[in-house]
Amino acid sequence: MQGLNNSFPFTPQTFILVGIPGLEAEQVRISIPFCLMYTIIFLGNGIILHVIRVDQTLHQPMYLFLAMLASVELGVTTCTLPTVLGIFLFGNNEISFEACLFQMFFMHSFTMMESGVLLAMSVDRFIAIYNPLRYMAILTLPRIACTGIAIGLKTFGLMLPLPLLLRRLPFCGHNTLSHSYCLHSDLIKLPCGNTRPNSILGLFIVIFTFGVDSMLIVVSYVLILRTVLGIASKEGRWKALNTCVSHICAVLAYYVPVISLSVLHRFMHPMPPLLQVMMSNAYLLFPPVVNPIVYSVKTKEIRRAIIQTLSRKRVTVSS
């Protein structure tokens, strides 16, 4: 009777999420590094946003794009936090069907927006090096705002059909996912209906966002390198390249986990569940942890603004 019920199409009320396979008894201990990473993400990106907001000298294109990056990273983290900590701290591994689609939509949306913001930041670096005298005139506040709006609209327009298509599919058999959050690639393995439109649309979105964005970032850095090599003085070349170091680190922190996970999925069959879960968590949590640290250490203006803000707060508390 159970077998007949499992083969009958249905819309599941809940999905079952998983923590780290084989380490279920250690979930409370495992929650400690996750809590630490979430704390670093919220504090680090929150401080970046705060100092950019309050310091007028940071109201420049480079730092406004950095504020966008910090915002979308907070968005990605906020989407995963309830289910990840819910599993590791409280053993709550169920999520409703609607909440799962909601999490999937916003988590993928913020992740794709992060790729778009990294592309915008690479264009910003190219303009700053290629035409520094007209840098502020080209990247005006309205144009930066329009860039952010365009990234958001493009992302939501591409992502909106995915949860709608999933809602129309019949589900059969198990409703257990492979991660501690809802991924589209994980969800389309469960329906017993035709998931080809979902797969085609998902592939198109990946190519149109991550593929195109990464290619254009490479092109922008080829142009940057060409421009830098045309600078006469060695000091000028080093100074120009030094302004790109933080962004290069952000690009590597974002794309290296993505590429590594894709390569492992393609060439390692079957992929060990523990490795898959760890790589997926690294893909989502590594960039938001690393980027605030890198920008705080490598960007003199951000470091100065953070020190001044902390000094003002210390003086306020002592008085």
Image (cartoon, helix red, strand yellow):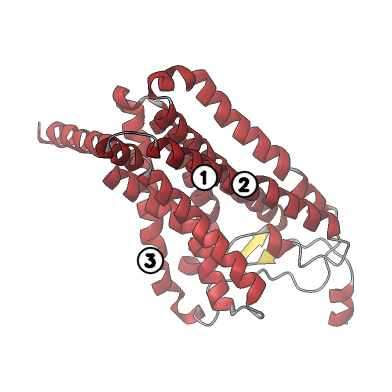
Q: Nearer the viewer, residue 307 or 259?
A: 259
Say what amino acid the circle numbered 1 marks: Gly
- x then y, percent, for residue 123: 50, 34
Say what amino acid the circle numbered 3 marks: Pro
Looking at the image, tell me whether mark 1 or mark 3 is earlier in sequence order.
3
Residue for point 72% across, 57% down: 97
Question: In the image, is residue 102 above or below residue 94?
Answer: above
Disc 3: CA contacts within 10 A as few (<14), some (14-19) or many (>=20): few
Say what amino acid the circle numbered 2 marks: Phe
Considering every residue shown, the one lying at the far top of the view is 137
Tell me the tag on residue 33: 3
Label 1, label 3: how far apart the Cα atoms are: 20 Å
Question: In the image, is residue 231 above or below residue 95?
Answer: above
Q: Are marks 1 and 2 in contact (CB under 8 Å)?
A: yes
Residue with the mark numbered 2? 106
Q: Tell me the element at label 2.
A: helix
Residue with the mark numbered 1? 75
- x then y, percent, for residue 28: 42, 72
Residue for point 10% across, 35% down: 318
Quadrant location, the C terminus = top left
